[in-house]
Amino acid sequence: MSSAYARFSLCLILLLFLGFGTAAVQAQENMSQPHSVTGCLQKGVEAGGFFILGEDGTMWELSGKVDATHVGHKVTVNGHVLHRSAADEAKFADHEKQEAQGKPYADFQVTSLKMISDSCQ
């Protein structure tokens, strides 16, 4: 009986480690190479949401280290382009389309933010 319990425990532990390893690899795959975007920081439609309209016309939905005191300022954000799952993307699609106003849009994980100008002009 204790031998069967020991084998079961070992299998359970192995499955847990495999699950955590898969999640870590998946999270790493969802992040791209470091990237910078410069543009006007704006308040998003959803609570706590922010976006930046990049100089190339792309609307970037921001998550991570965003300082709300810089809304309305020209900023440069550094971080990674996020590639969300289809299910996650569907949750935010309506807000992103509304904010993008027909422009291309993408998700961005901010690691740092630097103010360039205290206005967007």
Image (cartoon, rainbow, N blue to C red):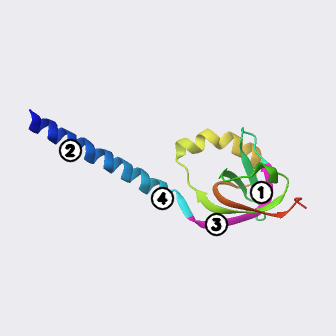
Q: Are marks 1 and 3 in contact (CB under 8 Å)?
A: no
Image quadrant for the N terminus? top left
User: Who comes first in sequence, dot 3 or dot 4?
Assistant: 4
Q: CA distance from mark 2 to mark 1?
A: 51 Å
Give the crowd class for mark 2: few <14, some 14-19, many >=20 residues within 10 Å.
Answer: few
- Residue 13 lies, with reference to residue 110, above or below; the image says above
Q: Secondary structure at mark 4?
A: helix
User: Who comes first in sequence, dot 1 or dot 4?
Assistant: 4
- Residue 84 lies, with reference to residue 56, above or below; the image says above
Residue carrying label 1: 53
Q: CA distance from mark 4 to mark 2?
A: 27 Å
Q: CA distance from mark 1 to mark 3?
A: 15 Å
Measured as percent of width and height from the top left, residue 42 is found at: 80, 50
User: Who comes first in sequence, dot 4 or dot 2?
Assistant: 2
Amino acid residing under circle 4:
Gln
Residue carrying label 4: 28
Q: Secondary structure at mark 3?
A: strand
Magenta part of the chain: 33-42
Q: CA distance from mark 3 to mark 4?
A: 15 Å
- Residue 55 lies, with reference to residue 8, above or below; the image says below
Q: Nearer the viewer, mark 2 or mark 1?
A: 2
- Write the residue at 15% across / 36% down: 5
Q: CA distance from mark 3 to mark 2?
A: 42 Å
Measured as percent of width and height from the top left, residue 51 is found at: 74, 51
Residue carrying label 2: 10
Amino acid residing under circle 1:
Leu
User: Who comes first in sequence, dot 3 or dot 2?
Assistant: 2
Labelled disc at residue 35? 3
